[in-house]
């Protein structure tokens, strides 16, 4: 059973548009939500993360919006560039410390940015 | 220079054969992880380790063993490979924060 769900499965936007990637979860104990970016032929790399005490986290063109009540979050990529074309994974854990927790990943959203 | 490396990058194995996937990290991280990536499932945790000599079962450990002989090296072992284990395998390392993991480039395994 998928504890972390992402939608859409694939997304195409024009260069300069804002891409919105969605993520939802079931386990109310989840408190930390990293997003990973993966280019073809490479391993995932941490892009940005948020904890449940915040409702927004911004890093340049990448912003996470978090709604704890609805157990939903979204990654907004503003002014999308062709170099942003990649697969994006939402993940979740209940604790920050690696001694007591594991990451659960969603199934990913494949983003294509068309010039 | 890549901090997490995996070998081999591609592997074709026969059903019933033994397969060993290797991972090396130069991050000096205590924790290491093995995931498999399949379309529609994202990344799923197979085994992980908190340090040399330790291995722990992840969410899908059946059919896999792991070995952590040193801080730098973490191996994934398929004693009797099956076609259902055809996948892309990723190794990762991390330290204090579970949400901050550093991944290798992956190994594509095909079991015929």
Image: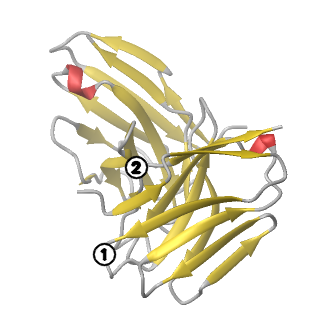
Quadrant of the rendered image containing residue B38 = top left
Local SS, label 1: loop
Q: Which mark is residue A27?
A: 1
- Which residue position is annotated with label 2? B33
- Residue B96 in view in this figure: no
Measure how far apart labels 2 and 1 are at the Cα level. Answer: 22 Å
Residue located 61% across and 32% down the image? A40
Q: Is residue B4 above or below residue B95?
A: above
- Crowd band around label 2 with a 10 angstrom C-alpha radius: few (<14), some (14–19), many (20+): many
Q: Nearer the viewer, mark 2 or mark 1?
A: 1
The foreground one among A47 and B40 is B40
Residue B72 placement (x, y as % from top left)? 49, 44
Direction from residue A83 to residue A111 in the image, left or right = left
Observer-nearest of B61 and A17 = A17
Q: In this rendering, does residue B67 appear at all?
A: yes
The structure residue drawn at horizontal position 46% and vertical position 85%, both measured from the top left corner, is: A68
Give the chain letter at badge 2: B
The quadrant in which residue B22 appears is top left
Left/right placement of residue B1 relative to residue A21 reads right
Neighbour class for label 1 at 10 Å: few (<14), some, many (≥20)? few
Left or right: B61 as drawn, with respect to A2 = left
Q: Residue at x 34, y 52 (%)?
A: B48
Give the colour scheme shown: secondary structure
Residue A109 drawn at (x, y percent): 53, 48
Q: Quadrant of the C terminus of chain B?
A: top left
Label 2 sits on a secondary structure element that is strand
Labels 2 and 1 positioned on one and the same chain: no
Q: Tell which subunit mark 1 falls on.
A: A
């Amino acid at each position: 059973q998928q504890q972390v769900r992402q939608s859409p499965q694939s997304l195409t936007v024009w260069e300069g548009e804002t891409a919105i990637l969605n993520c939802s979860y079931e386990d109310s104990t989840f408190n930390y939500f990293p997003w990973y970016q993966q280019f073809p032929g490479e391993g995932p790399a941490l892009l940005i993360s948020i904890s449940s005490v915040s409702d927004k986290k911004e890093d340049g063109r990448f912003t996470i919006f978090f709604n704890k009540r609805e157990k939903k979050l979204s990654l907004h990529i503003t002014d999308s560039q062709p170099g942003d074309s990649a697969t994006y994974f939402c993940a979740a854990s209940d604790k920050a410390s690696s001694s007591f927790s594991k990451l659960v990943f969603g199934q990913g959203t494949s983003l294509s940015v068309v010039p | 220079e890549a901090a997490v490396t995996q070998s081999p990058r591609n592997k074709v194995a026969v059903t019933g054969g033994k397969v060993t996937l290797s991972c090396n990290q130069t991050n000096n991280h205590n924790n290491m992880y093995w995931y498999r990536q399949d379309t529609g499932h994202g990344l799923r945790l197979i085994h992980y380790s908190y340090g040399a000599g330790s291995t722990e079962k992840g969410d899908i450990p059946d059919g896999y063993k792991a070995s952590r002989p040193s801080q730098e090296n973490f191996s994934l072992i398929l004693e009797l490979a099956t076609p259902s284990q055809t996948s892309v395998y990723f190794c990762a390392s991390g330290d204090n924060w579970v949400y901050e993991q550093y991944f290798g480039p992956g190994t594509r395994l095909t079991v015929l």
